Amino acid sequence: MLEMSLGILLPVLSLIGFIVFIIVLIKQFKHGGALQGILGIITCGLWTFIWGWIKHRSLAMTKLMIIWTILQLTPIVLVGVFGAAMIGQMYKFVSEFTGDPSLLLQQDQKGAVKPGFKKKGAPINLPKQRAKNAAAGQNVDWNTRAMALWEDGKYTDPNQAKGYWDRAIAANPKVAEAYNNRGLAFYNLKLYQEAIQDFSQAIRMEPKYAEAYNNRGNAYYELDQYEKARLDFVQSLELKPKYSKAHMNRGLVYFQMQKIDQACDDFKKACDLGECDGLQWSMQNGFCK
Amino acid sequence: MATSTSLTGKTRLSMTADSVNKMRIKDGLFAPVLGPLLQSRWIMILLATVTFVQIALTATGITTWQCPLRSTLGVVCPGCGLTRAVVLLIQGHWQASFDLHAFAPIILGIGTFLAIGGILPARLQQMAAYHVANFERHTGFVALIGLSFIAYWILRILNLI
């Protein structure tokens, strides 16, 4: 009930805040000039807000600015007070719509031929019950906050997600999934060495962590270290033979190593298990039959 | 004689309106922004505080200022990601910073310049304000950055960069 109320309240407050922003922005264009207005827009409204307070007396908009300030502060306070419950709802919402969130990352390959599909990584293995038990509440909050940033197979705000995982790890450094997930945030930030360190830590803590091997393989792949990447995908598949994403990723590595037959075998296996992007692309480009 | 006066009057009126419009656009875009800011020490302190808090909280993963455009319409505005890019730049992650927002170095540079300007002795501060305002008036420096921001934003939302 509380979550539902907040779910309605926050968008309404946000909309009113937006209307107030537009009113002040119009005043800024009118009284401050075009440049001031442009600056207001390009600073996410922050300059408009400061300008509004500077000019509130001369333009008689004190009440308007008070309303805007309250509207701006309310979500921060609400998130602070009810953060865990509300963001838990957001996570549920994201999970319902994305299902098993998998890593969908843009390829930036340096080979002569660029596969025209996206490489798949491991699903984030959210440390649900295990982390809840281990962290006694505090850690779960940062987990769920970070998870709420996960959309379309990658973090919408990897830097913020990294910050949340930092806190989750600080609260409880014994959860392998937290390292894996922070590794994914580093991966999204293209900080592959840092990502490898985190995935390696997750593997050290949980040697049978197939997803972490797969993710580390992806990071090695981005660094063009194909043999290391291949070994990680092999290890991942030994631990989890029906792991479609690892099959597809190993296929990509074989493709980069010019081992087209082995690449095709992996793409076919991945497709049998439900990941057909690799096979479709390779067939379209005449590499596999 | 009357016709001539009328024609002259019409022509003059038209030219005057045109010049006024041109002047308004020029004044609007070439109007100094940083110079007047530098003149007021308390505004500089306020800006420096807001910027510091924003950067420090962002660095610790806490969301502070909510972009009204993004939080309401779900559309990123030209400045979305800028604070995070500045944080990454300060942390030394150049590539990640550039990928997130290419204008981070420019904004960090301007911010540093203003912060230094804010703590200058009064006389030097006024001199700096005067010269910066003159520079802006002649080059339209801030307008150029603003318009480049908008162009960069359009390219970003169209996924062209």
Image (cartoon, rainbow, N blue to C red):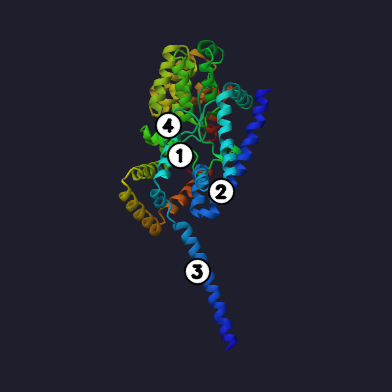
Say which of B10 and A163 sits in front. B10
Q: Amino acid at mark 4?
A: Ala
Indicate the secondary structure of the residue bearing disc 1: helix
- Looking at the image, tell me whether mark 4 or mark 1 is earlier in sequence order: 4
Residue A83: quadrant of the picture: top right
What x and y, as percent, mark residue B135?
A: 36, 56
Q: Residue at x 56, y 79 (%)?
A: B9
Indicate the secondary structure of the residue bearing disc 3: helix
Q: Residue at x 55, y 22 (%)?
A: A144
Indicate the secondary structure of the residue bearing disc 2: helix
Q: Which residue is mark 4?
A: B56
Numbered label attached to residue B19: 3
C-alpha span from label 2 to label 4: 27 Å
From what the image shows, is residue A202 above or below residue B146? above
- Looking at the image, tell me whether mark 4 or mark 3 is earlier in sequence order: 3
B56 left or right of A69?
left
Numbered label attached to residue A171: none
In the rendered image, is residue A132 in sight?
yes
Task: Say yes or no: labels 4 and 3 on the same chain.
Answer: yes
- Looking at the image, tell me whether mark 3 or mark 1 is earlier in sequence order: 3
User: Of circles 3 and 2, which is in front?
Assistant: 2
What x and y, as percent, mark residue A36?
A: 49, 51
Tell me whether circle 3 and circle 1 mark residues in contact (CB < 8 Å). Answer: no
C-alpha span from label 4 to label 3: 47 Å
Tell me whether circle 2 and circle 1 mark residues in contact (CB < 8 Å). Answer: no
**Chain under disc 2:** A
Indicate the secondary structure of the residue bearing disc 4: helix
Q: Amino acid at mark 2?
A: Leu
**Chain under disc 4:** B
B101 left or right of B118?
right
Task: Say yes or no: labels 3 and 1 on the same chain.
Answer: yes
C-alpha span from label 3 to label 1: 38 Å
